[in-house]
Image (spheres, rainbow, N blue to C red):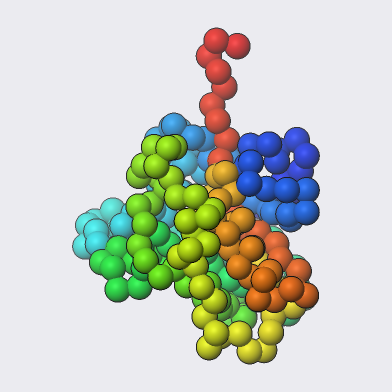
């Protein structure tokens, strides 16, 4: 599977992105549809299974798609780039210590290949409601995330020069914008890109 890049035609679907942002994705996740609608919807639904439900029989599907995501990134990303890049997972909505703290994105990054530079450079101090569990009006904002995010100073050496922000779905670009803002302020000379399993798209308007 090959990565696609967000371009001028698709950028308007993710209103926090600018022309300077380099973001890449594999699949298109359709908003407002359930897991059975598409391959992407099924993958994302499994990834978002809560850690507090790890004893349920269907939790195994989450572990399976985490491994598959790692394998897909491994096959698509340039090996030489991986050798010098710093992979930074977007923190989940729940802070460390919460029963539903979820390190799925870190697991995906670490599963790509042994020996990669994977760092949780950005920490979320407090828990929020997951974006997929609230309506559009209740989603966390960039400004709110900037209040919650902080750099893990113990992981800043050596300073990264090529940072890849990893997440599962690119929706409005809220988390990417907040992550890039915090990381760029701390590492102003680093190139920063975004890597996503899927980007959010909307179903066709039935009246058109």
Residue 150 in the image, given as x and y percentages of width and height: 51, 73
Q: Is residue 40 above or below residue 207?
A: below
Q: Position of residue 201 (x, y in %)?
A: 57, 35
Residue located at (47% from left, 56% from top): 144
Q: Is residue 36 visible?
A: no
Q: Quadrant of residue 95?
A: bottom left
Viewer can see residue 171: yes
Q: Work out whether 101 lies above or below 134.
A: below
* Residue drawn 69% across the image and 84% down it: 159
Seen in the picture, residue 74 relative to 128 is either above or below; the reply is below
Q: Position of residue 206 (x, y in %)?
A: 53, 14
Q: Nearer the viewer, residue 121 or 145?
A: 145
| Percent x, y of residue 110 | 53, 75
Quadrant that contains the C terminus: top right
Foreground residue, 125 or 97? 125
Q: Which residue is at 43% across, 62% downward? A: 92
Q: Is residue 34 left or right of residue 120?
A: left
């Amino acid at each position: 599977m090959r990565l696609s890049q967000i371009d001028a035609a698709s950028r308007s679907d993710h209103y926090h992105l600018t022309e300077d942002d380099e973001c890449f994705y594999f699949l298109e996740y359709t908003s407002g549809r359930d897991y059975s609608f598409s391959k992407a919807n099924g993958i994302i639904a499994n990834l978002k299974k809560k850690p507090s439900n790890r004893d349920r029989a269907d939790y195994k599907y989450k572990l399976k798609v985490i491994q598959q995501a790692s394998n897909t990134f491994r096959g698509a990303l340039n090996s030489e780039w991986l050798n010098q890049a710093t992979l930074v997972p977007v923190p989940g909505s729940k802070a460390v210590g919460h029963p539903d703290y979820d390190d799925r994105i870190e697991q995906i990054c670490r599963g790509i290949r042994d020996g990669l530079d994977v760092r949780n450079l950005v920490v979320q101090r407090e828990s929020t409601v997951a974006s997929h569990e609230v309506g559009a009006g209740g989603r966390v904002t960039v400004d709110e995330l900037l209040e919650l995010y902080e750099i893990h100073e113990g992981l800043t050496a050596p300073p990264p020069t090529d940072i890849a922000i990893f997440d599962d779905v690119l929706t409005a670009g809220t988390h990417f914008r907040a992550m890039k803002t915090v990381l760029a302020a701390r590492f102003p000379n680093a190139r920063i890109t975004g890597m996503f399993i899927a980007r959010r798209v909307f179903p066709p308007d039935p009246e058109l």
